[in-house]
Image (cartoon, grey):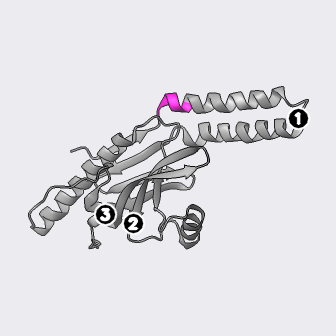
Amino acid sequence: MKKQVVIKRSWVGNMLFAISCLMVVMVGLFILEEAKLIGVVCILFFGVGGLYGIVFVAWKPLVIISIDGIAVPNRRGITFVEWSNVKKIEIIKHKIPNATQTYIGIFVFDNNILGNFAQNMTTMLTGWDEAPALLINNTFSFVRYEKIMAALEEFYDEYRKSQLSESGLPYGEVNELPNGAINTVTELENKQD
């Protein structure tokens, strides 16, 4: 068994992101004389956003999955959730005008990972009953959700085997939900301390 799986953003996705931002900046430069405000907004927003994405995000892994838990790099460092704290893992489809954004949501027992303010704001703005502690978003990463879910299932299965072997109980099969979400995480009722 591998110690961890590091799922990285693809260089194709990073290049598409950079080229998209560069194109909008060029359009902003082109229309600068005719529509100054729109041109400046295009240049600043997509120029700064593109640089931020390339400098601070593109080289970071999308997610790190190990026998200990799940880590997602973000602006503040890395948010880590231990398997013993995972309540359920779901593929979330969030509908926005003219599109659907897909995420993998990691819901936890101890929901103070985000902090109460961020947790309350997330549930209020999205309309979700509860907010996931981690959202894995693969926009511009070109990593298939199936690959991420397979790694999550593999390491959760390994975690369960290690927990059950330590307790001396027989190990059962890990069941799967239709979308590849981990059913045993959803059904996990006793938080391991």
> Height in image: 89 above or below 109?
above
Q: Which residue is mark 2?
A: 108
Specify the label residue 154 is tagged with.
none
| Distance between mark 3 and mark 2 Cα atoms | 10 Å
* Local SS, label 1: loop
| Pointer 1 or 3: first along the chain | 1
Q: Nearer the viewer, residue 100 or 106?
A: 100
Horizontal and vertical percent position of residue 44: 77, 40
The reply to whether the magenta stretch includes residue 173 is no
* Crowd around label 3: few <14 · some 14–19 · many ≥20 (10 Å): some
| Pointer 2 or 1: first along the chain | 1
| Distance between mark 2 and mark 1 Cα atoms | 48 Å
Q: Which residue is mark 3?
A: 186
Q: Mark 3 touching mark 2, by CB under 8 A? A: no
Q: Amino acid at mark 3?
A: Thr
* Local SS, label 3: helix
* Local SS, label 2: strand
Q: Residue furthest front?
A: 98
Q: Quadrant of the N terminus?
A: top left
| Pointer 3 or 2: first along the chain | 2
Specify the label residue 35 is tagged with.
1
* Crowd around label 1: few <14 · some 14–19 · many ≥20 (10 Å): few
Task: Please indicate whether residue 193 sits to the left or right of residue 79 in the image.
Answer: left
Residue at image position (48%, 68%) is 129
